[in-house]
Image (spheres, grey):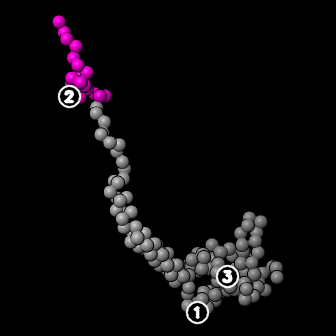
């Protein structure tokens, strides 16, 4: 005759058996971040956060300085590029768009557009926008229309 096992013995027996699907779970919930890390941050927050702020401020300052250096060219280079722009636009009386002019002059489009705007403010160039919304640049006094 079989005698019933006590409940505690049954649970021990099931714990010893490795049946699929009856795996024992972790004793505590698994966390993706160690709590000691947060304690370290809380204990040293007066050092960590100001240092992090200074690092970010330094990186932003460095980025601004690099961007300003990349945008400037000396006066002689500007004069040379402006001369080349005028020479190229005189070869094309109908005018040229900035991408075409940038590829011919081998100059970055952003720098070229800045030079073209300066030359337009100086009264050397004029521009008009086509129906396809492209800006065409030409030398003032050369071509069909004058402004």
Cβ–Cβ below 8 Å for labels 1 and 3?
no
Q: Residue 4: horizontal and vertical position, in percent?
A: 22, 13
Question: In 3D space, how far apart are the residues under numbered discs 1 and 2 (Cα atoms)?
Answer: 85 Å
Query: Closer to us: mark 1 or mark 2?
Result: 2
Query: Any mark on residue 132, and which?
Result: none
Q: Earlier in the sequence, mark 1 or mark 3?
A: 1
The residue to which callout 3 is attached is 116
Residue drawn at x 39%, y 63% is 42
Q: Earlier in the sequence, mark 2 or mark 3?
A: 2
Cβ–Cβ below 8 Å for labels 1 and 2?
no
State whether residue 17 is above or below residue 122: above
Q: Residue furthest left?
A: 1
Q: The residue tagged with tag 3: helix, strand or loop?
A: helix
Question: In 3D space, how far apart are the residues under numbered discs 1 and 3 (Cα atoms)?
Answer: 15 Å
Is residue 86 one of those drawn in magenta? no
Q: Residue 57: horizontal and vertical position, in percent?
A: 48, 75
Q: Residue 32: horizontal and vertical position, in percent?
A: 37, 50
Q: Earlier in the sequence, mark 1 or mark 2?
A: 2
Q: Residues within 10 Å of mark 3 (few under 14, many from 20)?
A: many
Q: Residues within 10 Å of mark 1 (few under 14, many from 20)?
A: few
For the question of whether residue 104 can be seen, the reply is no
State whether residue 14 is above or below residue 102: above
Q: Is residue 113 left or right of residue 49?
A: right
Name the foreground residue: 89 vs 6.
6
Residue drawn at x 30%, y 39% is 26
């Amino acid at each position: 005759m079989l005698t019933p096992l006590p409940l505690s013995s049954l649970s021990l027996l099931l714990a010893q058996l490795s049946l699929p699907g009856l795996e024992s779970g972790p004793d505590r919930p698994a966390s993706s971040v160690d709590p000691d890390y947060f304690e370290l941050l809380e204990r040293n927050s007066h050092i960590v956060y100001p240092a992090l702020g200074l690092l970010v401020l330094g990186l932003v300052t460095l980025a601004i300085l690099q961007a300003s250096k990349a945008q400037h060219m000396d006066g002689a280079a500007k004069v040379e590029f402006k001369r080349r722009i005028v020479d190229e636009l005189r070869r094309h009386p109908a005018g040229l768009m900035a991408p075409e002019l940038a590829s011919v002059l081998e100059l970055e489009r952003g720098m070229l557009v800045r030079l073209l705007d300066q030359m337009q403010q100086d009264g050397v160039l004029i521009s008009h926008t086509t129906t396809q919304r492209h800006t065409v640049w030409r030398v003032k006094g050369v071509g069909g229309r004058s402004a």
